[in-house]
Image (cartoon, coloured by chain):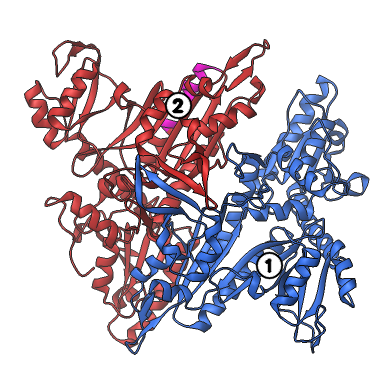
Chain colours: A blue, B red
Amino acid sequence: MADKLTPRSENFSEWYNQLVLKAELADYAPVRGCMVVRPYGWALWENIKEALDKRFKETGHVNAAFPLFIPMSFLEKEKQHVEGFSPELAVVTHGGGKDLEEPLVVRPTSETIIGYMYSKWIKSYRDLPVLINQWGNVVRWELRTRMFLRTLEFYWQEGHTAHATEEEAREETLRMLDVYADFAINEAAVPVIKGIKSESEKFAGAVMSTTIEAMMGDTKALQSGTSHFLGQNFAKAFDIQYLDENNTLQYAWTTSWGLSTRFIGAIIMTHGDDQGLILPPRLAPIQVVIVPIFRKEAEKAAVMEAVDRVHAELKAAGVRVKVDDRDNVTPGFKFNDWELRGVPLRVEIGPKDVQKNSVALARRDMPGRAGKSFVPQEGIAATVQQMLDTIHDNLLARATAFRDSHIFDPQDYAELQETLKEGWAFSWWCGSAECEAKVKEDTKATTRCIPFEQPEGSGKCIVCGREAQQKVYFARAY
Amino acid sequence: MADKLTPRSENFSEWYNQLVLKAELADYAPVRGCMVVRPYGWALWENIKEALDKRFKETGHVNAAFPLFIPMSFLEKEKQHVEGFSPELAVVTHGGGKDLEEPLVVRPTSETIIGYMYSKWIKSYRDLPVLINQWGNVVRWELRTRMFLRTLEFYWQEGHTAHATEEEAREETLRMLDVYADFAINEAAVPVIKGIKSESEKFAGAVMSTTIEAMMGDTKALQSGTSHFLGQNFAKAFDIQYLDENNTLQYAWTTSWGLSTRFIGAIIMTHGDDQGLILPPRLAPIQVVIVPIFRKEAEKAAVMEAVDRVHAELKAAGVRVKVDDRDNVTPGFKFNDWELRGVPLRVEIGPKDVQKNSVALARRDMPGRAGKSFVPQEGIAATVQQMLDTIHDNLLARATAFRDSHIFDPQDYAELQETLKEGWAFSWWCGSAECEAKVKEDTKATTRCIPFEQPEGSGKCIVCGREAQQKVYFARAY
């Protein structure tokens, strides 16, 4: 707290790194590229987990746990999969003091080992669909790392499903993408665009990858969750076959989908400001902080009585509330501290509030006077809950407006290049890997997704000028 | 389901292995010594987690996540710790296609890396106590493995706390042991004995290890949870120091405590019978299964109407209930199936029950007529909840009676040896490692714990005959 954060406008990346540390979301681990998720960050992740897990269970999924270690030979069974992942593997070569006969890979993702188990479990059409999710840790040996955004070890969920028909598997792929979008928008107040990844950007081993893409505060894109239709690629590699109703052996159709601790990065960079985090109310570990204010000891008893009463009422109503009763720091210090940590709403109670039976509310999303109001103590729980909803709506509207004002429709390739310095481009694209590669080389921007929502008609590819049937988002990305 | 389980009396170990597979709690992974925890087993673990996590939070603890990988040099900083764990390590030597400069150990437990982080975070007495827990996976390269009981990778929680004084740390150690005992008894209906581990059985690096010990159905002991007072051993190894109120630098005092998926083994082997699992009601993923019974299509509508109504009432009351409406198997098959899976209570609804506005209840803990009753549909939720409590109490009483009738007080060493073939011995022990080792060599039994509850006075060591101040439990153990 001693030093101010570097302003976002000055150095967004530095602002981010400082904020993760100062808000005590995470810390650097003594292993290169790994992080320690500190209690405040982990509580945020637990709320994310709970919101997602509820949605997974409502859509018929169950959780399980598959091994951390995968035999190297498993990865090699799906050609594109191993090509995609082999540069990023951590390999166990020694166990119990001996060299292993076959090296074990620390899972970078679990399609292979889960595919192997599914081939044991699935025999008949009656065993399908299999709808399993796993919460866990995975390891990808990345060279350039950033806390939450890209770490060697990260935490995520990976859903893996097997179906009797292609249609069902495709439906599942889109259903889970919808679940992610619903979660992002309605829990995290992060507006996302749903679409399909280009061939060069898709998951190694997928037939089709879908994604939700969000715009961060520096206008870069962040892939925030992906859902893959794997066709029969893994079913054939791992022999996941079932007897259909006519007693004919068929390969199953599979999907996988994942959302990770990376999403915490999305929350930080979508909502945060120069004072610190702004956490979306429905996920914030602490939704409301109460700061008692008194100068003289004589005022303390009356103030604390009101504080305790308001605290009890909010708690009983299910609000995640904390009283900051530290006696070694000033109220001003506390205000800054909780602003840094992004608590959505602050309740101040001083001697005047006690007299008037009121409290002061200060919204984190609107600094200064604009976000301040005085409300009666009576009915405080309902007032606060309504205010939290209002804050959610405001965060979402603000992020959506920011995003939409930074998506451009450049008229030619020169303008595209300029555009990509300050936002996204939504442009006609012929679909060729060459045009995609050219943009990447010239601007470092990649195709983020071919959104499901497309304008009518067709146009000219922004790169080569050929006829194009679809528009795509180009953006620099995390 | 096709084949019956091997009876417990015939081969307890075989019964256990078959049951884990047939009840679909877990399956063998394609990596030696690893398991796949299947959805039914994982749902049981999720309920265990929830029950424990609630208790951890109530006692002021927060969750966090520390890295999977630990630099080899960290383990070497605490001499006893590295001696204890080095034979069991899995080692990552390659990452991203290159040899690592320093090999990384896949954590077997996290005292070292957490100690390192605590030394960064703890500066002043105001930062203490630090009360952090972690839910995660760890790896110990075991040679002989059994699903849940001993696997290379297992799931657990590990609490790690740091305190300003020895007294506080000792209190914490015992507080968490009490939490484990309370959980075991009141959630899992597993009676446990609390006590202290002998010097030779304690955790590598601890000053004192405490444990809860349970007796399995074959009379072997299972260490079901441990809580360690680590003194200043890790604080000194990792330089966890703080400035006290007098501005003097002091080493902190630390504890650690853990309970793992091993506890699922304790549940299986404490309560299970020759028909299968008997899950304790408060942890069972499915507490109640409703089986509709009808022969003719004409009966179906009325039966299903009652089934749906009872289902809705139980669900609304928070009971974890499932309707088994499979149409390709008989009610008899379903009864066996859910008995195998240990669902505590079965509700049967047939045409006669519809007429009488009643249902039939069948208790899993009491097979046959003795466990069957007919109750009114009215007030079914309250009836069922009461019955689940009754089942819990019965399971606990039965397991306690079984245990107590298999704890003996042998009069001499010859009798001790006989005793240990069919139960535990509670005997005076002089405390010497030699006597402990002799018993182990002669009988394979180890000291399980020196219980906190001790008889008055003193006696003669059962092994050497010397004066002894304490009684200890000897038992063969998992």
In the image, which residues are magenta? Answer: B165-178
User: Few, some or many C-alpha atoms within 10 Å of disc 2 (few <14, some 14-19, many ≥20)?
Assistant: many
In magenta stretch: residue B352: no
Q: Nearer the viewer, residue A340 or A89?
A: A89
Residue A421 horizontal/vertical position (percent): 86, 62
Q: Is residue B354 left or right of residue A412?
A: left
Amino acid type, label 1: Ile
What residue is at 21 percent from the left and 70 percent from the top?
B2
Q: Quadrant of the C terminus of chain B?
A: top left
Residue with the mark numbered 2? B173
In magenta stretch: residue B174: yes
Residue A212 horizontal/vertical position (percent): 68, 67
Kindly state the secondary structure of the residue where label 1 is placed: strand
- The chain letter under disc 2 is B
Residue with the mark numbered 1? A212
Assign the magenta stretch its main secondary structure: helix
Numbered label tally: 2
- The chain letter under disc 1 is A
Query: Mark 1 or 2, which is nearer the eye?
Result: 1
Disc 1 to disc 2, how far (Cα)? 46 Å
The answer to whether residue B415 is seen in the rendering is: yes
- In the image as oriented, which residue stretches furthest toward the left? B414
Q: Is residue B302 left or right of residue B62?
A: left
